[in-house]
Image (tube, rainbow, N blue to C red):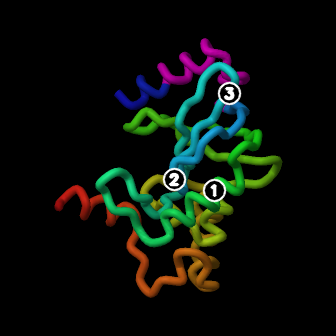
Amino acid sequence: MRTFFFAAILLLLAATGYPAAADYRTTGLVVRVTDGDTLVLNTGRTSPKVRLFGIDAPETRHLAKAGQPFGTEAKRALGEKVLGRRITLEILDVDKNRRIVGIVRIGRRDINREMIEEGWAWAYRRYLTPPLAASYLGAEKDARRARRGLWQQEAPQAPWIFRLRQKLQ
């Protein structure tokens, strides 16, 4: 089912004007940052929500749901990097929430990796695959060692654990 859905999204992207949909890459202007790992990209024809691949940032407060420490700071950090800027998106997947999942680049910069490197996100082990796994896990290790961003906390709670605990309450 997931493969079918992903193929359908790629066909939709091609039909709605995503350039070079065959190589899973597009460009656009970032018009909104929702949190530390999600943004909205205006391609000129569509404005999909984009989830940054391989990272998981602390949760921000949503309506009645509490946020995590450093959630607001992670959102701000991503916004400073990409909001109002033209980016290249390497499309890798579509998630269960129908967001496009990909690697955000500005020139040669890997914004996903930068978010980990600066301590604003975890390397999301559940979805990481080579060759990015080594790079992203190494960036997290360096950020932890240097106590950057969220690693200033004694024992930060990973967002996937935070979400699970919220769901169980």
- Tag 1: residue type? Leu
Q: Most prominent secondary structure in the magenta stretch? A: helix
Q: Position of residue 84 (x, y in %)?
A: 72, 43
Local packing at callout 2 (Cα closer than 10 Å; few below 14, some 14-19, many 20+) is: many
Magenta region includes residue 137: no
What is the C-alpha distance between the residues marked 2 and 1? Answer: 8 Å
Q: Residue at x 38, y 73 (%)?
A: 157
| Callouts 2 and 1 close, C-beta under 8 Å | yes
Residue where numbered disc 2 is placed: 35
Q: Position of residue 152 (x, y in %)?
A: 54, 83
- Report the quarter where the N terminus lies: top left
- Residue 21 within the magenta-colored segment of the rendering: yes
Magenta-colored span: 7-24
Picture quarter containing residue 129? bottom right
Q: Residue 112 location, x and y as percent?
A: 63, 55
From what the image shows, is residue 84 above or below residue 127?
Answer: above
Q: Note whether 90 is above or below 126 in the view shown.
A: above
43 or 19: which is nearer to us? 43
* Residue 43: mark: 3
The three-letter amino acid code for the residue at tag 3 is Thr
Secondary structure category for the residue under label 3? loop
**Snapshot quadrant of residue 134:** bottom right
